[in-house]
Image (spheres, rainbow, N blue to C red):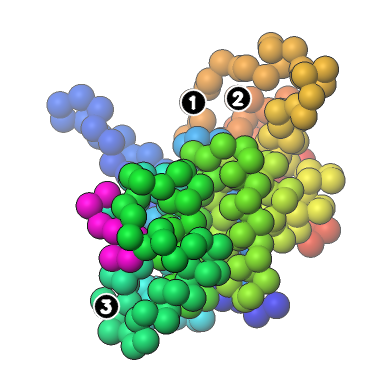
Amino acid sequence: MKPLLSVRNLTKTYKVRKGILKHENINALKNITLTLNEGEILCVVGESGSGKSTLGKIILRLEKPTDGQVLYKGKDIFKLGKQYTKEVSVVFQDPRTSLNPRMSVYEILKEPLVVHKEKDIEKKIKDALSRVKLPPEVLRRKPTQLSGGQAQRVAIARAIILSPRLVVADEPTASLDLSVQSEILALFSELNSKGIAFLFITHDIRVVEKIAHRVAVLYAGVLMELGEKEKVLRKPLHPYTQYLLSNVPARHPKDRKPVESIYEEEQKPPKEGCPFLPRCPKALEECTKTIRRVEIDGRTVSCNLY
């Protein structure tokens, strides 16, 4: 596969106030390197605070990195013009906040076409609506008059109306009922089959199972494991990936684990070494100071066990 997006040694540091005169630097991302290929679905998974959304915001140019680069077709995204916003689009988590409640669906879909001075506006609106399987009558409605699933389909239609090469989807099923989630995931898979690549941000391993080609596991801003979905889910190498998979919600009540094995006291990641160290059952002495990145079985793993 040909790389579409390349993230190179990406670091994002925030300065957080600690008292009147003191500040602390917090790494939301630390030295992240990965690629997303043309026509691929790369799922980025991890718990809250892992840096998933920060990565998405930088790729969308909503944030600037502290260090490192993001390249689109080999070019720095922050040196590209308006064409980048046409070829790279986004679907946010909650359509109730991402869609303007004062605008009709027609106006919402028309807006990006007008901004980019597109022709055949009516045809492109009709085509986008058809691709997300919504009837023409929703064009007259406002987002507040739609169900959650319909509103998210409108958000997806807006994201694809300019025929992007890449869509960043940030937890796009998290606010939806389970039955609707399955429909939306099937829609993403169908759009992907037509050539759109996706960076799919999620905390739900079950989503990864359904749609990913590859998966990137983040924890406290560090890329813990990156590889093909089948390999990562079948035989996770990093203790954190193993932890995530062992705590996937049971499909049936009889399979639920004891509560004490799921809930653990939250511990702050150390400033040096492996951020997962305080929670890792396999930690080594060297994990307090360094973390080694290795290539195993076609995967990238940041762990001193290998």
Q: Which residue is mark 2?
A: 278
Q: Which residue is mark 1?
A: 268
Locate residue 305: give its quadrant.
top right
Q: CA distance from mark 2 to mark 3?
A: 52 Å
Q: Nearer the viewer, residue 196 or 151?
A: 151
Contact, CB < 8 Å: mark 1 with mark 2?
yes
- Where is residue 258? Give x, y as percent: 75, 12
Magenta highlight range = 101-107
Which residue: 43% across, 51% down?
151
Q: Residues within 10 Å of mark 3 (few under 14, many from 20)?
A: few
Q: Amino acid at mark 3?
A: Val
Q: Which residue is mark 3?
A: 114
- Earlier along the polypeptide chain: callout 3 or callout 1? 3
Q: Point out the frontmost of discs 2 and 3.
A: 3
Could you tell me how many numbered marks the image carries? Answer: 3
- Where is residue 264? Give x, y as percent: 61, 17
Q: Amino acid at mark 2?
A: Pro
Secondary structure of residue under mark 3: helix
